[in-house]
Amino acid sequence: MGDRRIQACLNGARARGFHPLLPVTPSELAAEAAACAAAGAVAVHVHPRNARGEETLDPAAIGAAVAAIRRAAPGLPVSVSTGDWIEPDDRCRLEALRAWSRLPPEARPDEASVNLSEPTAPLAMQALLSGGIGVEAGLASVADADRLLALGLLPRCRRILVEMDDVEAAAAEAVSAAILLLLGTGAPERQLHGSGRSAWPMARRAVALGLMLRLGLEDVAELPDGSVARDNAALVAAGLAL
């Protein structure tokens, strides 16, 4: 268990009512990040919000969340999302991603996830790479993996996220296995995670394969026994105890 790596995904696109302790504000994200680090997480992934509690790519909001986490958990790598649902306007979204590189070092994300299913994924990846921000390539299908390989950007990624939707375990296992087979072995690091029904089956599969895990309220609120987790740290601890 000492070599097991787990990233805590603190909030995602979840609404406040999803869980009593879902973190939204910079201070809440910072407190949860510190608790997850204490529980054994080696990285965090967050979806910062604006003053209305909505997901945003605005550099000021991104910087405020990242800086707060850095103060609470020094040295913990911070990843954010670039999802196109957050900012549907392609030009505005890419401008925001480019602007992140101009944030002061203490407020700049270490990494950002890019969904290869999105039309502008190649442009988003280039914007991040040119700004010195690591790319986490999100693959939810074999088609996504094919696209990543065709782009020739696999070696430049910080991490590959093989991520399954809220589907039955057998379906998630079949798709994730096909993606991993296509990618082969070696660098960069592979992470395997699911959502909802597939969250814990994928966590167990990640452990069996020696891959990085991801758990947190973005993906699931329940522990393996079906009870509701107290917070993100409880999910991290349960993942490390598998």
Image (cartoon, rainbow, N blue to C red):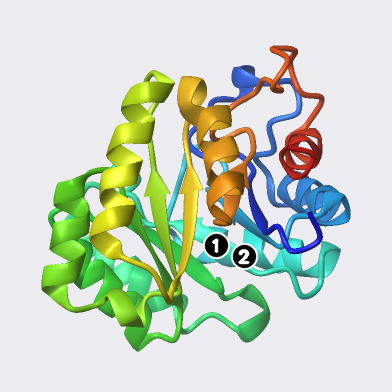
The spot of residue 199 in percent (x, y) is 53, 30
Residue sitting nearer the eye, 128 or 24:
128
Q: In the rendered view, would you say 31 is above or below 100?
A: above
Q: Residue at x 26, y 78 (%)?
A: 126
Q: Quadrant of residue 113?
A: bottom left
Q: Is residue 38 left or right of residue 59?
A: right
Q: Is residue 159 left or right of residue 174?
A: right
Q: Is residue 231 left or right of residue 125?
A: right
The spot of residue 96 in percent (x, y) is 35, 67
The residue type indicated by label 1 comes to Ser
The quadrant of the image that shows the C terminus is top right
Q: In the rendered view, would you say 204 is above or below 178?
A: above
Q: Which residue is mark 2?
A: 78
Q: Which residue is mark 1?
A: 79
Number of numbered discs present? Answer: 2
- Give the CA separation, mark 1 to mark 2: 4 Å
The quadrant of the image that shows the N terminus is bottom right
Does residue 192 appear anywhere in the picture?
yes
The residue type indicated by label 2 comes to Val
Instruction: Look at the numbered disc 1 and give the secondary structure of its residue.
Output: strand
Q: Residue at x 21, y 62 (%)?
A: 121
The spot of residue 193 in percent (x, y) is 49, 42
Instruction: Look at the numbered disc 2 and give the secondary structure of its residue.
Output: strand
Residue sitting nearer the eye, 65 or 50:
65
Do the numbered discs 1 and 2 sit on residues whose CB atoms are within 8 Å?
Answer: yes
Does residue 48 appear anywhere in the picture?
no
Residue sitting nearer the eye, 194 or 63:
194
Q: In the rendered view, would you say 203 is above or below 118?
A: above
Q: Residue at x 71, y 22 (%)?
A: 223
Q: Is residue 97 left or right of residue 205?
A: left
Report crowding for label 2: few under 14, some 14 to 19, many 20 or more residues within 10 A (C-alpha). many
